[in-house]
Image: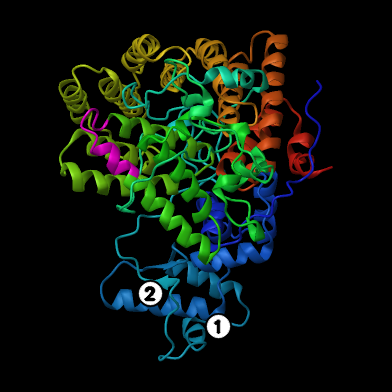
Amino acid sequence: MDHPGPQPRTGFQRVQSKSTRNVIFGPFKNLIEQKYVIEGCPLKEIIEHIRTKYGVVQSPKQYKSQLKTWGFRHKLTLQDAAFILRLLNQAKARGLDEVVLFSTHPRRREDITKYIQRNVKLADENDLLSYISNDDETPHYIKLPDHPIEQPRATSSHLPPTPPSGDSSGSLDPPPGCAEVPPMKVPIPSPESSPRYPDVRSSHQGNGARWSTSTAASEPVFIDLDQTQEQLAAQETISGRQPAVPDIVGPFWPSQQRIDQSIWWPQRQDEESTTHWPADLTNALLSVTPAALGNLGFDMNRFGDHTLSQQLNDGSSSAQFVTYCLFWLICVGQDDDGLQKEAEYYQNSAMFSFLCMLKDLSSPGEDCLGALSVVTVLFDCYGQTQRLLDLLTKCDEVTKNHLGVHNPLTVTIAFKKNMLQRSGGSSPPHDIVQLRDIYLQMRSLFPKSPGPALTARYNLAWAMLENEMKKDVKDCEPARRELQELTAQFELHFGNDRIETIMAAATWARATFYCGDIEKAERILGHIVCPRVRKNFPEDHPYTWEAKHRQAFFLLQLAKKDRDNSAGRRWFQFQQAEQLLRQVVRDRHRILGESNPKSVQSFHLLWTVLQEQGKVDEANSLWEWCTSE
């Protein structure tokens, strides 16, 4: 099969900061602890394992720095063993369980006994204790546990599978610690919550032809309704047209009446002002592992026409909010004091716009929900989960200050944050009664507009599905039926191609997948969701990569399900998945960066697809393919 040729490594220099390092290593913390601390694997072996399976390459020095930050050690020095023995003796004297934590891992007296037996320098426990004095302070990574420690159980060196939304979906295991969320499971903006502006799609109809295919590894981290807000900022009202961010918000163009673009975006006269950043650079700057601006500095006027969106340029509070959030995201990601101050300004400006929406008596809360949904979609595409949480927190503060603690919008924001913070299957179930009550409140508060109520109903259906995923015996059929009906209602109210409808259809596909009908789920995604994505997002948009990744995930599951059926059909499904993922891995690595969580997910899914086909050598040399000329 012909597949995209290898691409040169990205020319983008990435920001090197402590926060970026935490983003890179954070998803692998559990894996590194298991292999390094518990199993005692050499660091070189761990580095190679992560490079081969997840496509992340960091130097031994960077690994050692992170290990020091975490306090991880895997080899006991004589002094370490002596400190452990001293604490064990203290625990025994105090009548406590004889267990000590070494780099978070329990060590017991039998471990020290074996250590002494293996070490030719030591005769007994007293000999070991002689390596420290009574005045020596115990290192911070050696301590008595705060709570009783269970007896050790057998642990696997392999990563536990964490399928979409933290649920198990087969043998596919995502990057360690990466909570995966169902495809396109972003909060659906309500019709009324999305700004209602004139139709400007006609100027972007060419975007559909540029779309390409793919989705997320083991389940894209599609955000679950959540957002953060900022404090009130500028006292001045922001007016006039806002610079457009390169084709980032294209899918949110409303489809009402048509107007002349020049009303919102007059033709520029000087040649200098038309020199804009390419879309690749904009996307790289918005990544959670951002490109470094360096001497370029930040100039919002350099966001170019290739991503011109009326929603970002019509002067409304919603447009200002989304635009300022993106500007904040770029500036806050740079390791530069001056840009950090600019980031604070843009964040405060975004919160001022959010307050303006809250104070709009004609539709309080409606534009807020829509703007938050747009921001959620965009931030998720770039792997910006933590920054989205920060933003939602700020928005929540503004909402509570203006509307009080108890109101449907505050509860909705809290639900979004809760979705983002959940990972794995250990979190408590969602409060269905409360979510149903929010739905009823939305219907009562907005009787003339079904948008907010539809949003609340979607959240309810999403939570129903998530709760089922935590049960041993799952019944996803009620959630699937609800999402199918909701998709039809979204089509009637929003239109087939609006982002709200796309999100509902994608979640319907996910519920269908969990009901066991993988083939129908893939059809929904391939014949309903993806064509609509093509009409909204260009090929080089990160959300397009997310959709392709999801489609590849479903194709992989279909091929695995058909293991005993037609070899030709399975081969075709594997080839489709591989083709999609090679495109996604190439683009995500080059633009978002190899260590972006989205890039890691897609790399690992492609590695899995190759392994399933028996292409072991290709799988294990995938990193070389990504970086070769």
Q: Residue furthest front?
A: 269
* Secondary structure category for the residue under label 1: loop
Mark nearer the viewer, 2 or 1: 2
Magenta stretch contains residue 356: yes
Asked if residue 622 lies left or right of residue 262, the reply is: right
Q: CA distance from mark 2 to mark 1?
A: 18 Å
Among the two numbered marks 2 and 1 on one chain, the one whose residue lies closer to the N terminus: 2
Please report the residue visible at 66 percent of the width from the left and 60 percent of the height from the top. 295
Q: How is the image coloured?
A: rainbow
Q: Amino acid at mark 1?
A: Ala
Q: Position of residue 452 (x, y in %)?
A: 27, 24
Please report the residue visible at 31 percent of the width from the left and 66 percent of the height from the top. 97
Q: Callout 1: few (<14), some (14-19), or many (20+) C-alpha neighbours within 10 Å?
A: few
Please report the residue visible at 38 percent of the width from the left and 77 percent of the height from the top. 87
Q: Callout 2: few (<14), some (14-19), or many (20+) C-alpha neighbours within 10 Å?
A: many
Q: Position of residue 104 (x, y in %)?
A: 44, 63
The quarter of the picture where residue 619 lies is top right
Residue ID for mark 1: 123
The disc placed on residue 88 is: 2
Magenta stretch contains residue 563: no
Q: Position of residue 541 (x, y in %)?
A: 60, 32
